[in-house]
Image (tube, helix red, strand yellow):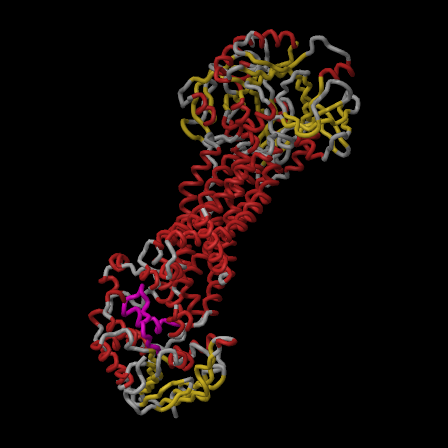
Amino acid sequence: MPVLHAERLVKSVGEGRAARTVLDDVSLAVETDEVVAVIGRSGTGKSTLLHVLGGLDAPDSGRITVGGERLTGRRGGALARIRLRHIGFVFQQFQLIEELTGRENVLVPTRLPGAPGGGARRAAELIDELGLSDVADHRPHELSGGEQQRFAIARALVNDPQVILADEPTGSLDAANAAVVLGLLANLPGRAVVIVTHEPDTAAIASRRLALDDGVLRENSNRSADLSV
Amino acid sequence: MSTALGQLRGALIEAWLALRTRRRRALIAATGVALSAAMLSCAVVITDGLGGGFPRAVKAADLGDLIVRFKQQRAAQVVRRIAALPDLSGYALRTEVTQATFAYRGHSTTKGVAEVVGSGRRQGYAIVAGHNLRGTGHEVVIEQGLATAWHIKLGDIIYVRYLAPERVVGVAEGPDDVGYPLAAPRIYLSRAAIDAQLGRDPDPEVNFAEIWLRNPRYLNEVLVQARDESFGLQDLQFATRSGVRVLIHEAAGIVIDLLVALSVIALATAAVMLASSSKAEVQRRLRAIGIRRAVGASRTHVTLTQAVEAMIVTIPAATLGTFVGWIATYGPGNRLLALLNEPGPGSALALPLLASWLASVAIPVAGAAWPAWTAGGRAVISLLRGADVKRRRASSRSWPRRMRGHSNGGGGLTGLGARLVAARPARLVATSTMLACSTAFILLMIALAATLSSLETDPQELGKHYELTASLPPSYAPQVARIPGVQAAEPRYELHAADGYALGEIVDVIAYPRDHTLFEAPPLASGQRLRGDGQAEVGVGLANALGLAPGSPLLLALPSGRELRLRVSGTVSSLDEEGLVAYVPAAALLAADPSAPSQIAVLLKPGANQTAVSAALTRLGAAPQAAAGAVERGAPLVAVLKTILRAVAIVDGLVCIYALTQACALTVQERRRTVAVLRACGAGAGAVRRLLLGAVLALVAPAALIGVLLELLLLGPALSQLAASYATLQLRASALEILATVLGLALAGLMTIWWVARSAVRESVVTGLAS
């Protein structure tokens, strides 16, 4: 059974003459241990798809389940609880909290009400595994881009979610750091990973690639075609 | 010129369009400006109204430089003595009839004061309605306080004993004393009209003279001369303008100076709040400013647009706030002034209010324009990058890394909230300062109200232990002491004497045959209690006025013309008569003045029935009276003061809530992305509230602590000293009052958390992430 299952998602943005359908009857199923890359040009709705899958945005219609729990139709607190337990986000701009050290940023989700126990231990393990122990007490502005993104990945993983949603995870990194981050995302056993990107190298790590174009999601077997901006 | 107009027009259009898209925020900002303007306006009305009350009254009434009261003398004799004074500009004589009886409809008094005045131009009182006495017919001018209390209107008839019914032709304010009901009700009658009714006396007896000097700077010299010329005049009492002012303050209670001082604090608080909130608003919009600069707008245009936008919000809000503040305090302020026989500021208040309005507009506009000007000078790219929060390397230096290493989650969400607020140290300091001042201000008002109530009703506050006085001869004391429920009864002698060296101070002399501390014992400030016939305890007020200390000689000139020489054994903190009191042995007093007036002071046993004792005293032929507090007959004054304090406190409380909410809302607004990240990680409304709890704690906790310390260590003692330098007034807030105020702050904090969290979780997480 897929850990992430989306059926017939429709999502429009804008109003009146500016209205545009960015997701048009999109369906997607992602299994555990699977890495799915959603590719497409800028502005095609990749990030919107990711936000909808993560419960950050609501589809106009359709149904999503994550870890067996229905996401669509839930509101506020219920959605937050599903995100807390089942979903981890990785953002292009890392989105680390400036006032907190790298370690504290990783610990943030473990301190949220309803977070599973053992968060501090997992945070320590993740920081160690990701090679961040030496810089764990540095503030984000004292870290390199690659280190910041690794802390962001650790934060996404700290509550042991089943689904990782990554939005252009290497978009702000140089090639060397991008390779390290991609290596991490490609090796997250027991989890389903969805990456949206317009970079061929990033999409290359995926076990399955999908292309989003004009709101329609299709299988994409071409490893390099049509990925440029 | 046309370029400037064009630029202004462009700025106006841009500002209007910007406001249209931010209606809610503009409304919130306007609310803050309105509240601050209201507070400023309250402060101005109180400060100007009360602070300037006496000078206005003096000017309106043309109060004499010197007021002299004496035992009735023929006018011709008094005129001769006055004419001998140097630098004389003019004088007026009156006959002041005390214990006068007059009545109006359901009201009557036997303790009124009828002032019989001559026909001179200068009378020492101001007509505030109707006209002055014309010297013909049955006319009377009544005091404003009496007119208000008895609802007497012009044209009404009042009845004065021994006279025909008198028609009220004018209402007056006489600043030489406070008004009814703080003092006895006063009416003014024309001597010519009295003569017409009772027969003319070519040389009437007078007991009151008001003297005007050409140059008031020579008052002291004139006073010395006046004392020399006063030989033969009995019960002589001099009062200068400043003396009258002191006298009025005695009755007005301690409060006028306090209110003026409190208003200054309120004014400073409002200024801090206005400036910080405006600055924060522009800081929030730095990115928009960057966009304008990027598309070619000049620095001047950016600043002008910001200023115009601020003006569009501020002008109506400041106008409304100023009006509301004026309405809230003008009426009660005028009622208070009327009680003090002082005129309201009237149209003279327009200028200070205009200045307050201008300040309410100018501070936010300047607060908005200056950061815009500063921002306009910054690199456009840094503004576009979202320069709303500077990435402060300094903050990492201030938190040593080895300490950060031990940190475990940054104190959770509450700690994070506190850190987000601390990332804006200037705003944190401004808001906390404002909250601290407000906390101290509110605590002070509570303490003041409690002290006023206590002074009004509790004789113990004055060190008086006896509960009753009975107007019986001293020989009745043993009989009174035998009444069931009475613990002790002794004669209490009291008279007014003058300082025998300078004759400048009137001293309330109190004497008991034995130990006076059984009946009244104001706290000893220095030295020791009197222990022999040659000793006296003096109030700190008297000690300060005459430079007395334990061991100093004290010479009192008694009304009998005899002198009483004593040595000061100690000083006492007494609120009675502004501390111009002296406790002396009865034997010494009676030796100098055997006819010294007395009553019997009655100390009851604990739990004794005061009514039953009063009834027993009445059966003995006495008119028992309960011992009074400091502001006897001051209930209306206290009521008016409470109204004023309440109005100011409400505005202050609202400003507090606004400042707290605004500070938290701005923090959340600036940190939308942080909040969005937390929500993306699974934080619900509860977690956002916890984050805000930290922010509120960071703002409120130091403010509460500083506010309490400020009141306890600085404001309370300073204002009690200011109000009564002659005694120790307890203006420090009690533990219960502190607890109540802190709970109020906590409640304001909870309201803030609820409101801001509600707004924060309504925003889409995606929008927050993209900000």
Residue at the front extreme, as displayed: B2
Please provide percent x and percent y for residue A145: 25, 71
Image quadrant where residue A190 sits: bottom left
A58 left or right of B196 in image: left
Q: Is residue B539 magenta?
A: no
B526 left or right of B189 in image: left
Residue B490 visible in the picture: no
- What residue is at 48 percent from the left and 18 percent from the top? B533
Above or below: residue B523 compared with residue B213: below
- What residue is at 75 percent from the left and 24 percent from the top? B160
Please provide percent x and percent y for residue B334: 60, 37
**Magenta span covers which residues?**
A88-112
Please provide percent x and percent y for residue A83: 40, 78
**Front-lying residue, A32 or A39:** A39
**Front-lying residue, A5 or B751:** A5
**Front-lying residue, A59 or B155:** A59
- What residue is at 46 percent from the left and 42 percent from the top? B265
Residue A88 visible in the picture: yes
Image quadrant where residue B679 sits: bottom left
Q: Is residue A106 magenta?
A: yes
B312 left or right of B210 in image: left
- Split into 4 quadrants, where in the image is the C terminus of chain B? bottom left
